[in-house]
């Protein structure tokens, strides 16, 4: 995206239209909280807007959105953990998103976050292992190994349920 692309008032709308559902879904897989996923996605678009205004000569690619969202999720989870530890309480169960059948969602959410994230990026975002590796700062081989283990764990949990 170049300066000429975001001079108009509605330059952000196509980004939101194209990526918001996918970003919310990705954030949900990471946070297991639908409302937090929506908040993090909204914050990601605010950061996109701010970045483009500050750096009108820089290109933005969709991967920037996913990386920014992931960083926001990690910050949110860290703050939530601090909040939960301070209050010695528990988080409320969030609403069930409509894009996943409940039984599959519940099984998927039992996986470790790293496994859920790789499965989501590979199957639901159609990312290659190379794209996932760049996004997570891993080697493609490590991503393939993580995917294999995640599939095995998911299959075992699914069959047990």
Image (spheres, rainbow, N blue to C red):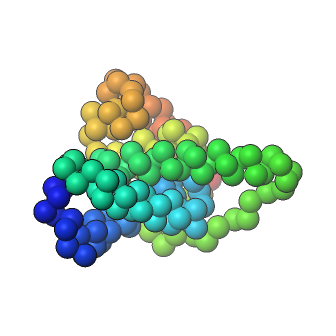
Residue at point 81%, 46% (across, down):
85
- Residue 47 in the figure: left or right of residue 152: left
- Quarter of the image for residue 34 reads bottom right
111 vs 131, nearest the viewer: 131
148 vs 96, nearest the viewer: 96
Q: Position of residue 55 (x, y in %)?
A: 27, 50
- Residue 27 in the figure: left or right of residue 84: left
Residue at point 86%, 51% (across, down):
88
Residue at point 21%, 47% (across, down):
58
72 vs 143, nearest the viewer: 72
Q: Position of residue 150 (x, y in %)?
A: 48, 38
Q: Quadrant of the N terminus?
A: bottom left
- Quarter of the image for residue 52 reads bottom left
Examine the rendered structure and indicate whether residue 27 appears above or below residue 117. Answer: below
Determine if residue 40 is in view: yes
Q: Position of residue 155 (x, y in %)?
A: 50, 44
How many numbered discs sit on the rendered protein?
Answer: 0
Hey, which residue is sitting farthest front in the picture? 54
- Residue 160 in the figure: left or right of residue 140: right
Determine if residue 24 is in view: no
Residue at point 32%, 68% (across, down):
16
Q: Position of residue 28 (x, y in %)?
A: 52, 58
Hey, which residue is sitting farthest right in the picture? 88
């Amino acid at each position: 995206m170049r300066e000429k692309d975001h001079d108009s008032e509605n330059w952000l709308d196509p980004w939101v239209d194209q990526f918001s559902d996918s970003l919310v879904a990705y954030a949900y897989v990471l946070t297991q909280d639908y409302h937090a996923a929506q908040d993090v996605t909204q914050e990601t678009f605010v950061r996109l807007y701010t970045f483009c205004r500050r750096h009108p000569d820089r290109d933005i690619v969709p991967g920037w959105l996913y990386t920014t969202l992931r960083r926001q999720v990690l910050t949110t989870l860290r703050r939530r953990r601090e909040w939960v530890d301070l209050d010695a309480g528990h988080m409320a169960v969030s609403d069930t998103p409509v894009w996943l059948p409940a039984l599959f969602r519940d099984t998927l959410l039992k996986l470790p976050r790293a496994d859920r994230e790789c499965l989501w990026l590979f199957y639901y975002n159609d990312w290659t292992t190379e794209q996932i590796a760049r996004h997570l700062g891993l080697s493609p081989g490590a991503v393939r190994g993580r995917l294999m283990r995640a599939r095995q764990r998911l299959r075992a949990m699914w069959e047990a349920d």
